[in-house]
Amino acid sequence: MQFTAQIIDGKVVTSTSFKQWISTLKNGTRLVMDIEAIGKDQSFNQKGFFYKGILPKVVAGFMELGEHISIREAEDRMRHGCPLLHEHKVTQEGRTSIRIKEVSELDMPTMSNFIDWCIQFTAENLGIIINNER
């Protein structure tokens, strides 16, 4: 499940759907939560479209190819495959290193370009067409 929340006056304010989902769980249920801050220049719409509109289709595409991956693995594959997220650095010794940016680091224009790249990748490599609902 994926939900968004906001920090207001030092408290986590969640959506009604999150509260409803939590209420369906039995006492003692253990959860693993992956929390990521949205970059200051990203929109909820961009993040929502990426996590709910693109990544599940990427997972489905890989499953069609016989490869079972998680949403996190799909995100990592998209990040590593997209050259827009590669940050090249040259050390003092002259070696080049590449750091892959996290989605939360992307500003709004870069996030839009990343989403477009993911849509193109999914069409070309997985045979899945994603309507750009932005």
Image (tube, rainbow, N blue to C red):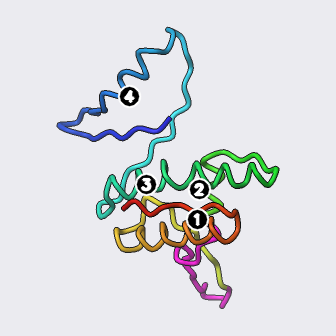
Residue type beneath disc 4: Phe
Which amino acid does the dot numbered 1 rest on? Arg
Q: Label 4 to label 2, Cα distance in Å?
A: 22 Å
Residue 97: give its label.
none
> Which numbered mark, 4 or 1, is in the foreground of this view?
4
Give 96 or 42, whichever is nearer the viewer: 42
Instruction: Please report the bounds of the magenta region as a residue range.
Output: 80-95
Assign a secondary structure to mark 1: helix
Local SS, label 4: helix
Q: Are marks 4 and 2 in contact (CB under 8 Å)?
A: no
Q: Is residue 83 magenta?
A: yes
Q: Quadrant of the C terminus?
A: bottom left
Q: Are marks 1 and 2 in contact (CB under 8 Å)?
A: yes
Q: Dot 3 corresponds to which residue? A: 49
Residue 79 has which mark? 1
Identify the residue at image location x=36%, y=41%: 4
Percent coordinates x, y for residue 74 in the rendering: 63, 54
Please give the residue where the numbered disc 2 appears in the rendered image.
75
Q: Which mark is residue 18?
A: 4
Q: Nearer the viewer, mark 2 or mark 3?
A: 3
- How far is disc 4 from disc 3 in space, using C-alphas? 18 Å
Residue type at mark 3 is: Phe
